[in-house]
Amino acid sequence: MYLLYDIILHILFISLLPYFFFKALFIGKYRDGLLERFGFIKPWKLSRLQNARVVWFHAVSVGETKAAIPLLRMLKDRHPETKVVFSTVTATGNDIASRDGEGLIDVLIFFPLDFSWVVKRVTRRLKPLLFIVVEKEIWPNLFRLLNARRTPTIVVNGNISDRSFKRYKRFGLFFNSVFKGISAYCAQSELDSARASALGIKRTLVTGNMKFDIRMPSLGEKEKDALKGELGIMSSERVIVAGSTHRGEEEIILSVYKELCNEFKRLRLVIAPRHPERFKEVGELIEKKGFSLLRRSEQRANSNVVKNNSSKPRDMKGEVILLDTMGELGRFYGIADIVFVGGSLVEGVGGHNLLEPAIYRRPVVYGPYLGSWLYVAEMLERSEGGIRVADGEALFDKITRLLSDPDLAEGLGEAADKVACENRGATEKSLQIIEEFLYA
């Protein structure tokens, strides 16, 4: 079965090679870490791991990387002698790991392709004592080779979506052998734990969602005023932040904003696309829809900004701020009056982090397509800390209600924050499982 998997993987790669070659010519992220993806890790990186106890963490992209940072910090605090290798699939995830993992990650690499000859080369060079997967990445050849080396594989913050569960069950003969190689599965919820057990994982336990433990940048009133001042946002203006948006959502959000501007004065919209390669596209869309566009990247480079404490009011009705920088979305949630979390109004994405705005005590609004975030949404809704909408019309109605009733909006934000506070602790529980294997 593994031989057939390897053959299919190579055939798919060869068939897609022209596509990736074309992308690599014009898009830098497809060139990033190319040699590492084929198992060629630079000698200076490997030299940092000589004669060390190595733990290899893997996170596919931004959300998983952010969830892993508190765990890395706790691991390094308790076991400073441990060397951490951290891998990501995406360039944006790699950037976040480089920035937020400074002092915690000893070697940062791009995840190798799951060809047997590639992962064999990487495991021989890294020699990890443990391999720790964040959330949902399943790599059959790597899991098999680690198991052959008697290297424990642990999944932390594990979740299994409906679609993934059905796919794994459909190919149960193959995936059962893959899942049997997992030493421990730390699940986000009871449902995830039950699904993991049904797939053949012998040891499953519910530790909770580590994203509740993410530390958001602290913003005092002075910091909020300064950020608003940089953007020319007056204290009387209310701010809607649409974070981690995807293609198809921006059109809906801009239509809703246009309607809102007819109902409310002194209103500002911030749109933060999920993927950097879409910044230009979204900027063009904003202007096409007839809005004035303020790019955060240009504004940061321009010293001639309007300060928030200016005594001269500005009519900014219809201006949209495009957050086209990386690593600032959390700060923008901190100045928002209402937050919409993207990836949830269009099918096939599965939503994004609902907890970041909750930690800032902001009312959280999101669409119906939530994927692995469904149970967090249900927790927020049970506590009246989150609002789910079906479409653009419902989004307009709910935001209108929140803007019309500040007390309601404040109560939703407080309820959301309470949910976040009451569900912390998954990182500590996950580390306890890791420690069982670290010195076994």
Image (cartoon, helix red, strand yellow):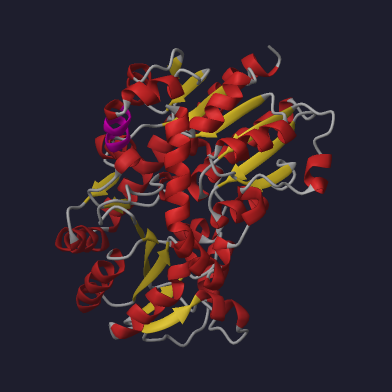
Residue 164 appears in the figure:
yes
Question: Could you say which is closer to the camera, residue 241 or residue 52?
Answer: 52
190 relative to 231 in the view: left or right: left
Locate residue 374, reporting x and y percent. Answer: 29, 39
In the rendered view, tell whether residue 367 sits above or below residue 332: above
Q: Main secondary structure of the magenta part?
A: helix
Locate residue 47, reporting x and y percent. Answer: 84, 41
Residue 207 appears in the figure:
no
Question: Could you say which is closer to the camera, residue 412 or residue 372?
Answer: 372
Q: Look at 17% across and 58% down and name the residue there.
A: 391
Q: Quadrant of the C terminus?
A: top right
Q: Is residue 435 magenta?
A: no
Q: Is residue 164 magenta?
A: yes
Q: Look at 75% across and 26% down and name the residue there.
A: 79
Q: Quadrant of the N terminus?
A: top left
Locate residue 340, reporting x and y percent. Answer: 33, 57
Q: Quadrant of residue 415?
A: top left
In the rendered view, tell whether residue 234 sits above or below residue 67: below
103 relative to 416 in the view: left or right: right
Q: Quadrant of residue 179?
A: top left
Q: Quadrant of residue 399?
A: bottom left
Question: Could you say which is closer to the camera, residue 292 or residue 416?
Answer: 292
Locate residue 34, reporting x and y percent. Answer: 62, 56
Q: Look at 55% across and 76% down and name the residue there.
A: 297
364 relative to 57 in the view: left or right: left
Q: Which residues are magenta?
A: 162-168
